Amino acid sequence: MSKVYFSTWRGEQISNVGKAEDAWEESAYNLPAQYDDHRESKAFIGWDGVALFDPDVDVVRLATEYAAQYQVYSEACGRCAPGRWGGRILYDLLDKIARGEGTHDDVTHLKEVSNSMQLTSKCEIGKTVPTPLMDLMEHFKEDFDRCIDEQVASKHYDTEVNYIAKITAPCTDACPAHVDIPGYIEGVRDLRFDDSLKATRQTMPLAHTCGRVCPHPCEDACRRSNLDDPIAIMELKRLGADYETDHGFGFFHPAEAKPKGDKKVAVIGAGPAGLTTAYYLALEGIHVDVFEELPVLGGEVAVGVPEYRMPIDKYNQDIEAVRDLGVNFIVNARVDAEMMRQYEKDYDSVMVATGTRISKKVRCGNERPELDGYWSAIEMLDQVNLFEKYGIGEEVDLTGKTVVCVGGGFTSMDVVRCSIRANAKKVYMIYRRDEKTIIRNTTYEEYHEAVEEGVEFLFHSAVNTINDEEDVIKSLLIDKFELVPDPNGGRAQLVKIDDASFTIDSDFLIPAVSQSADLDLLPEEWELEMTSWATIKTNGVDYMTSRKGIFASGDCEYGPMTIVNAVGQAKRAASVMARYVESGEITLTDDEIMEDHLRKMRVYDKKEKVTGWLPGIPREHSEVLDVDERKDNNKEVNYGFTQEQGLSEAERCMRCYYIAMIAQ
């Protein structure tokens, strides 16, 4: 809720003109009335209307400056005349009026061009830029008339006003790494896979990885969903990365790295958060040393995500893109508190990105880690992947064994599908909630591929007790639950069903319910603030800890998260760190501040009725290995799109760029 002087945002009609400020009606939306801790906003204008927070706003100049952003960002695709020329006409006419040289015919022409753009532009930026301009011309007609009738400039035309604009899209806003999704899709559509990959790497260096194992929350915010089916955003991302690798090109970095200066940063952990931090710091010309405890680089993606989902040669390409910028990696380097004390002295800043590699317990009866057959998910996946990907250690052979995994996320999916490939006789996943929830936690494809391969899912179930003989697991007592609706309308509760418990034989119980962070590396005297779930506390905005110069991102900051979430955190943290090591100050860029405002506002409107596009164009589906071809080996399951499929799917994109702007 925001107090506004005037608003048409998302169809609301609020006018507090002439009212005392303490009587102003509030907007139903979380509009950015406060820009940051030090500055207030005078107005917000965007794709779905306008909001004024200050009665003194120059609405004519506001409209002019917004129209100017259409030229600045040049995001119109140029494939239609209204989009190509309409925005220029809007700006020219509005500026003419704002400087006191306009006519009423210009207003008529403005409305005609605006209507034409809204109806006939091919992309959303051309359709939406006129929307708030029309609102201002309608509701503040007297301000425009004054400039025309008196032939005077608008009231603040020559006044210094700060206008801050941001380009976004519903999918980009929903992506934790804020990837320019329409940009990389357009690269595919134009057969410029190099441009596609550069667009991705602006904010996401791990294009191979997140083109394969991302849960793609962006697809939940795809406006195409309001018409038929969302774009296959994740699979389109991988095309640019595979093009770079398969054709043996060098690395398509989004920009040339700045010359190396004298600043240096230590990064603890070479998983997605650590790699991302290193990549963007190196682009800024900062020396980066990355310390990794494991004998291999890549963190949990390397030793936790199976080869059939994330081929190591592809992930290594992402890692080599980071190394290509001059990043220095040190493996087999378990950092302790004494080393951290030294790093604080030797480096200008330190990033802790150690992940979460301690499996949590199921919390059932007779649960003892020393039991033969009790195997944490992290340990199991480490052994599988170190052998399958690197030839390190011993092969996991589960022939004739029954495996029970407790969980409901990606880690548990990896456990059960690896167990199938290790030739287990029977594989169960025990999950307290339902099928819909497990799909939401992972993906539709991941769940159904596991079912095809023979995993049996026991929903609304939980392990009550482990039964052993002489410390060897033999069976598990399983309780059944049912969802009981809350009579007060709250969340339904899981209630144990009496007399419904049953026993299943089991050789292995593998907990995959969650992981915790091993933070013994942090010196006690630092007294870093911690969260209630024993991770490193930051404010979630700039990712500095309670100790100046020490940053944290990824799982050790938030708890177990997806790869794209870790990348998003680390990208922001690297940006802040790059400025911190130069100035000693913690600051956000205007682009980052706007990013946060838009996320709070929610760019995607799931209730929007999308018009002007042809519905019913089927979504492309890439070929996957047949179940009999994949369940006994680690071949990559998903082939990805062919070029023809990629082009067809990219053509479905509605290119939903929007412009948002704040006046200060």
Image: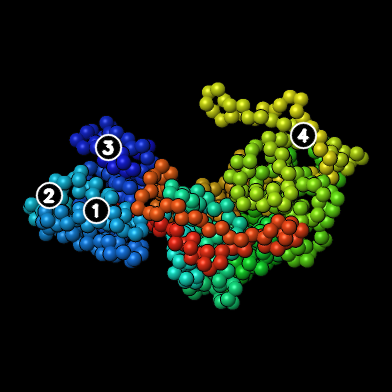
Residue 93: name its quadrant.
bottom left
Choose between 315 and 130: the one closer to the eye: 130
Q: Nearer the viewer, mark 2 or mark 1?
A: 1
Disc 1 crowd, CA 10 A, few/some/many (<14, 14-19, 20+)? some
* Residue 597 higher or lower than 498, as above or below: below
CA gap, disc 4 and disc 3: 57 Å
Asked whether residue 662 is in view, the answer is: no
**Where does residue 1 sit, x and y in percent of width and height?**
37, 37
The residue under the point 11% across, 54% down is 104
For disc 1, the marked residue is: 115
Disc 4 crowd, CA 10 A, few/some/many (<14, 14-19, 20+)? some
Mark 2 in CB contact with mark 1 (< 8 angstroms): no
Disc 2 crowd, CA 10 A, few/some/many (<14, 14-19, 20+)? some
**Where does residue 551 sit, x and y in percent of width and height?**
56, 54
535 horizontally vs 458: left or right: left
489 horizontally vs 129: left or right: right
CA gap, disc 3 and disc 2: 22 Å
